[in-house]
Image (cartoon, helix red, strand yellow):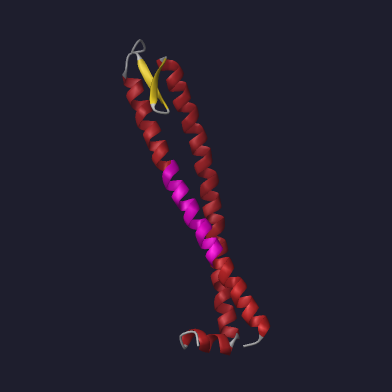
């Protein structure tokens, strides 16, 4: 196999692995944000059922501090909005990375098809 093909093969492998790592990280981040958003929505629902004069507390690190119910509801609503925006951005990043992964995989297939030595090496077990 010539040096040009070998170099191109190595570059493509690196790009594919890098892109896969980024895609996994984004998917993991999306799952985390979705869980956070769901917890936020459930908390909002529970707060809505309580009378306005109910004493409520919010978590602040390891401590719980008093917070007026309307203010806490406002914070929850604001947090839900920002989480929604973050999820939208992450979904678009995921779509971009998936499209990029498909293109990289097509490039790899094309390189293998155009290089009989590379094709033989892959089919032959990397010899």
Residue 31 in view in this figure: yes
For the stretch drawn in magenta, the main secondary structure is helix
- Residue 64 belongs to the span the image colors magenta: no
Identify whether 88 is placed above or below 51: below
Q: Is residue 20 magenta?
A: yes
In the rendered view, does 105 fall on the left or right side of 69? right
Furthest residue toward front: 62
The residues colored magenta run 17-33
- Residue at 60% across, 77% down: 9
Residue 34's image quarter?
top left
| Res 103 seen here | no
Q: Residue at x 41, y 38 (%)?
A: 36
x then y, percent, for residue 47: 35, 22
Residue 112 is situated, as x and y percent measured from the top left of the image, at 56, 82
Residue 121: x, y in percent? Answer: 52, 87
Tell me which residue sits at (57%, 62%) in the image: 100
Q: Is residue 106 above or below residue 97?
A: below
Q: Is residue 4 left or right of residue 41?
A: right
Q: Is residue 59 above or below residue 12?
A: above
Q: Is residue 71 left or right of residue 52?
A: right
Frontmost residue, 41 versus 124: 124
The count of marks equals 0
Q: Position of residue 80 (x, y in %)?
A: 46, 32
Residue at the limit of the structure toward the top, as seen here: 53
Q: Residue at x 42, y 14 (%)?
A: 68
Where is the N terminus found, in terms of image quarters? bottom right
């Amino acid at each position: 196999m010539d040096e040009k093909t070998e170099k191109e093969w190595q570059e493509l492998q690196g790009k594919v692995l890098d892109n896969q790592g980024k895609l996994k990280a984004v998917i993991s981040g999306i799952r985390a944000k979705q869980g956070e958003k769901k917890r936020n929505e459930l908390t909002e629902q529970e707060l809505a059922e309580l009378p306005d004069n109910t004493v409520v507390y919010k978590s602040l690190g390891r401590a719980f501090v008093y917070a007026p119910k309307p203010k806490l509801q406002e914070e929850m609503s604001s947090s839900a909005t920002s989480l929604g925006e973050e999820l939208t951005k992450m979904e678009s990043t995921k779509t971009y990375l998936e499209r990029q992964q498909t293109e990289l995989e097509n490039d790899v297939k094309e390189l293998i098809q155009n290089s009989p030595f590379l094709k033989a090496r892959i089919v032959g077990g990397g010899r």
